[in-house]
Amino acid sequence: MNFTILRTFTFYNITQHLLAKRRGGGRNRYTRREETTPQFRINDMIRVPEVRLVGDNLEEISGEIGTKLESGTVFDTRQVKGWGRDLGLDLVEISPNASPPVVRLTDYKKFLYEKKRKEKEIRNKAVKTVIKEVRFGPNTDDHDFEFKTRHARGFLEDGAKVKAYVHFRGRSIVFKDRGELLLLRFMKELEDLGAAEAMPKMEGRRMNVIISPKKSSKKSSKSKSDSDDDSND
């Protein structure tokens, strides 16, 4: 009786151990492999017979190895790897689909750092498009129209796009012509600061138009502000 219980218990433990190893061990092994896999092929991972060598450090490398190197020249891959080993540099494949692949001799960690830094700079310089909405009804009166137009001018002067729309509720959908005329008038009032990307069009129960600021709008607005400040002085 005790032997049967012991055998069952032992079998259960072995089974659980194997399952845990398969679940945990396998996942960890793949995770470690992913972490150590370079983003670019480097050194002995590059197995093509020839490569095209480029880089802004080739003049310095030329002085070290005693051979004049010109950017874009094709070399035997083993030869370039040898230069890298002698100088403590990595052979990094930067254009794998080129024929032959394009490579650089550089410090791989420094190469990745510079790449990330440049990507960050590009993201920071990217202009984020801001769209401000202005809502009208088909029966918007002149006072409300002028009030919202003034706000729209401010948005355009700040460099934002303006999306103006006329919302048709219930039976007011029959007054599409009024909505179109109102948006055309709106476009006309703002033509010194922005231009419509397209003519007003219906989307569901709304008629929309998007007005983009002219490149000189923000600059001219700032110039006008500076001029006003100077005159006040």
Image (cartoon, grey):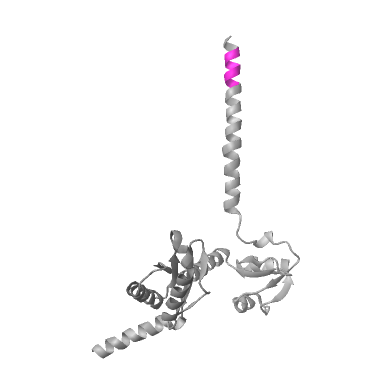
- Which residue shows up at 57% across the image and 52% down it? 35
Question: Residue placed at 34% from the left, 72% from the top?
Answer: 144
Quarter holding residue 85: bottom right
Horizontal side of 138 relative to 7 (left or right) equals left
Choose between 35 and 181: the one closer to the eye: 181
Q: Can residue 126 be seen in this view?
A: no
**Could you say which is closer to the camera, residue 16 or residue 2?**
16
Taking the image as shown, residue 218 lies to the left or right of residue 126, namely left
Which residue is rendered at x = 43% and y = 72% of the image?
162
Residue with the most extreme right position: 49
Secondary structure, magenta segment, majority class: helix
The image quarter in which residue 231 lies: bottom left
Q: Which residue sits furthest top? A: 1
Question: Percent from the top left, x then y, of residue 197?
Answer: 52, 75
Assign the N terminus to one quadrant of the image. Answer: top right
Residue 7 higher or lower than 174, as above or below: above
Residue 186: give x, y in percent of width and height: 42, 76
Which residue shows up at 48% across the image and 61% down it? 205
Q: Position of residue 54 (x, y in %)?
A: 65, 74
Q: Is residue 6 magenta?
A: yes
Instruction: From the viewer's side, name the closer residue of 57 and 28.
Output: 28
Quarter placement of the C terminus = bottom left
Is there any visible trace of residue 4 in the rendered image? yes
Bounds of the magenta segment: 4-10
Question: Image quarter for residue 216?
Answer: bottom left
- The residue most toward the left is 233
